[in-house]
Image (cartoon, rainbow, N blue to C red):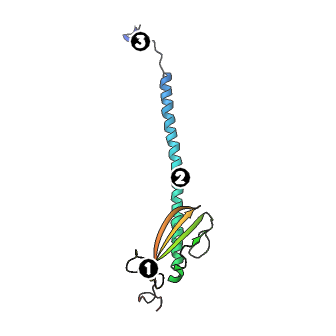
């Protein structure tokens, strides 16, 4: 039975939270904390993958720089070459054995870069570089090199 005190109904219930309310609050706070920790862990993974992609792209570009210092027959001779550890455009090895570069060099037609031609007399090549980290592919880049011998606007061959 409820008592009336100064015109207000009073219950026998004491002020405060019930055990059920405290448990529900604890579960909700726990779920929020778990979600926050999982988000931080995922952020670290994404950051590492981004760093790997950046370094992989750099190492692929280093092969392009190395190839562009060579003539076409020397580039063709690099077909199916693996550099482990990866090399820089100077030819010096990169400082980690975790990274490797795998090359596929394909002679192509200068008028249709998708058409493969015989290596003898080829005037263009497609260089595909797959950069791997501990054997797992990270990035694949494709470059083209052309025989510039006799092209009037270059300093090659005259």
Earlier sequence position, callout 3 versus callout 2: 3
Please name the residue that numbered disc 2 is placed on: 45
Earlier sequence position, callout 2 versus callout 1: 2
Is 46 or 132 nearer to us in this picture? 132
Q: Which residue appears farthest toward the bottom when viewing the image?
A: 158
Asked whether the residues under the numbered discs 2 and 1 touch, taking CB atoms below 8 Å apart as contact, a structural biologist would say no
Tell me if residue 134 comes above or below residue 113 in the rendering.
above
Mark 3 or mark 1: which is in front?
1
Residues under labels 3 and 2: Cα distance?
58 Å
Q: Residue at x 43, y 79 (%)?
A: 117
Please name the residue that numbered disc 3 is placed on: 10
User: Which label was assigned to residue 117?
Assistant: 1
Residue 84: x and y, percent?
61, 68
Q: Residue at x 52, y 83 (%)?
A: 73
Q: What is the total number of numbered labels drawn onto the structure image? A: 3
Mark 2 or mark 1: which is in front?
1
Residue 59: x and y, percent?
54, 68
**In terms of secondary structure, where does tag 3 sit?**
strand
Q: Quadrant of residue 5?
A: top left
């Amino acid at each position: 039975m409820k008592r009336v005190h100064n015109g207000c109904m009073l219950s026998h219930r004491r002020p405060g939270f019930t055990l059920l309310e405290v448990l529900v609050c604890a579960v909700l706070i726990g779920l929020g904390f778990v979600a926050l920790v999982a988000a931080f862990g995922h952020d670290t993974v994404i950051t590492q993958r981004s760093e790997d992609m950046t370094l992989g792209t750099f190492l692929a570009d280093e092969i392009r720089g190395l190839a562009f210092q060579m003539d076409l027959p020397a580039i063709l001779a690099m077909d199916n070459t693996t550099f482990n550890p990866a090399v820089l455009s100077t030819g010096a090895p990169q400082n980690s054995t975790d990274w490797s570069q795998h090359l596929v060099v394909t002679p192509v037609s200068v008028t249709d870069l998708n058409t493969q031609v015989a290596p003898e007399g080829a005037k263009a090549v497609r260089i595909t570089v797959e950069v791997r980290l501990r054997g797992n592919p990270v990035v694949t880049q494709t470059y083209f090199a052309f025989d510039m011998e006799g092209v009037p606007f270059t300093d090659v061959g005259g």
